[in-house]
Amino acid sequence: MTRHIGRLTALFVKKHKTPGMFGDGGNLYLQITNANARSWIFRYRNRYAGLGSAFNVTLEEARDLAYECRKLLREGVDPLEVRRTKQSQARLETAKVVTFAKCAEGYFQAHSPGWKAKYAALWSSSMAQHILPTLGSLPVTAIDTAAVLRVLTPIWTTKPETATKLRSRIEAVLDQARVLGHRDGDNPARWRGHLDKLLAAPGKVRRVEHRPAMPYASIPAFMAQLRARDGIEARALEFCILTAARSAEILGARRQEFNLDNATWTIPAERMKGGTEHRVPLSPAALQIMSVKSDSKLVFDVGDQSGRALYKELKRLGIDASVHGFRSTFRDWAAEQTTFPNHVIEQALAHSIGKVEAAYRRSDLFEKRRDLMNAWARYCTNVGAAEVVPLRTAKRI
């Protein structure tokens, strides 16, 4: 095996440019791919173990490495497996200084460009509030089941929905860390076959009680109470009810989205839950709110786009209802007090439709929805004998 060692010279290694495999003897080869790519190879038993770049490893160093490989073979040890083990250990040693917080930051940077702004904000907020205080400073290799449970157990039975999302986010970060070579082994945050043996199923912890939606019969009086209040939160909540839009769409609204001459608000696709541009017809009552001046790029700059500001306004008014529930209120009113077709109502709520129906529906029913939203605004602003669109006199569409 060691005969004829020393065929190559340092000058040949440096100057030769013709691609090929050039033997030095003792199973050592110089592999030249092109003028900028040349490396050392230890060849044995139809296997190839890389010994490094010829630009970084000298001929003498390569011969020493080849000698070590031959020695391992004499001892019955595969040199390639030894090198792979050493490389794996080196990666793990490097990973020890990579913290969970660093991995979470990398995950966010990689995935957030495909997220909606609201979800990105919620993801970052949940990390900062619930996960990073416990796991952030730990090496990602040190995250085990016990560490994950320290995050989840305190809120698993009191806030099962939040805890479930946290578990999923920890799992995603650790999965990416494994793919990047920062950790090995199973994911301690996985649910099936692991945490499901240690924690109660979140859906069975307790029945989730949703805040009630305000009955539509109470809307006119409530709107009068709301209009009497000052503050951008009250205006945002009023506009939310009049347009039947989602709170995220309201709080993220920018003035350039509005064409007040045409009484139209066009919400871009990236801000819509369904990912499709949505036009909202503005009633005279909604247009009146738009006359409020602001130096902010946002129409309703309440300082918090999560929707909590609107919920707090409801609490200040003594109302035990959710902001999102006003969409249900609008839906109930339209179904029970008008003869507007169901597909017009659903379009007003920007609800997704089936693929077959979408293929045949070419219009967004905008003018029909304008009639609907004007009728809703008249109902909302008519205190006392609340005006409705009676079933016997409603315009049939």
Image (cartoon, rainbow, N blue to C red):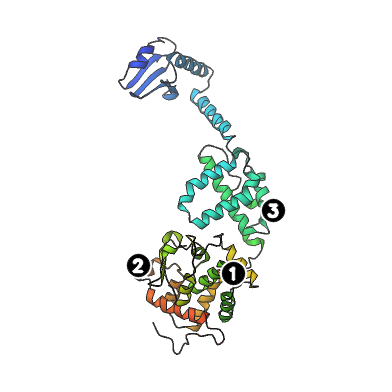
The mark closer to the camera, 1 or 3, is 1
Tag 2 residue: 359
* Front residue of 378 and 80: 378
Pick the quarter of the image with the C terminus.
bottom left
Indicate whether 194 appears above or below 272. above
Indicate whether 347 appears above or below 391. above
Q: Earlier in the sequence, mark 1 or mark 2?
A: 1
* Front residue of 258 and 94: 258
Mark 3, other Cα within 10 Å: few <14 / some 14–19 / many ≥20: few
Which residue is found at the position 48% from the left and 54% from the top?
115
- Rendered location of residue 377, percent (x, y): 48, 78
The mark closer to the camera, 3 or 2, is 3
- Rendered location of residue 47, percent (x, y): 43, 25
Three-letter amino acid code at disc 2? Ala
For this orientation, the residue located farthest to the right is 154
Mark 2, other Cα within 10 Å: few <14 / some 14–19 / many ≥20: few
Cα gap from disc 1 to disc 2, whole angstroms = 34 Å
Tag 1 residue: 322
Pick the quarter of the image with the N terminus.
top left
Tag 3 residue: 154
Cα gap from disc 1 to disc 3, whole angstroms = 26 Å
- Asked where in the image residue 229 lies, by quadrant, the reply is bottom right
Three-letter amino acid code at disc 3? Pro
Instruction: Label 3, secondary structure: give it.
Output: helix
Indicate whether 193 appears above or below 140. below
Q: Earlier in the sequence, mark 1 or mark 3?
A: 3
Which residue is found at the position 49% from the left and 46% from the top?
109
* Front residue of 274 and 225: 225
Instruction: Label 2, secondary structure: give it.
Output: helix
Which residue is found at the position 67% from the left and 55% from the top?
155
Number of dots carrying numbers? 3
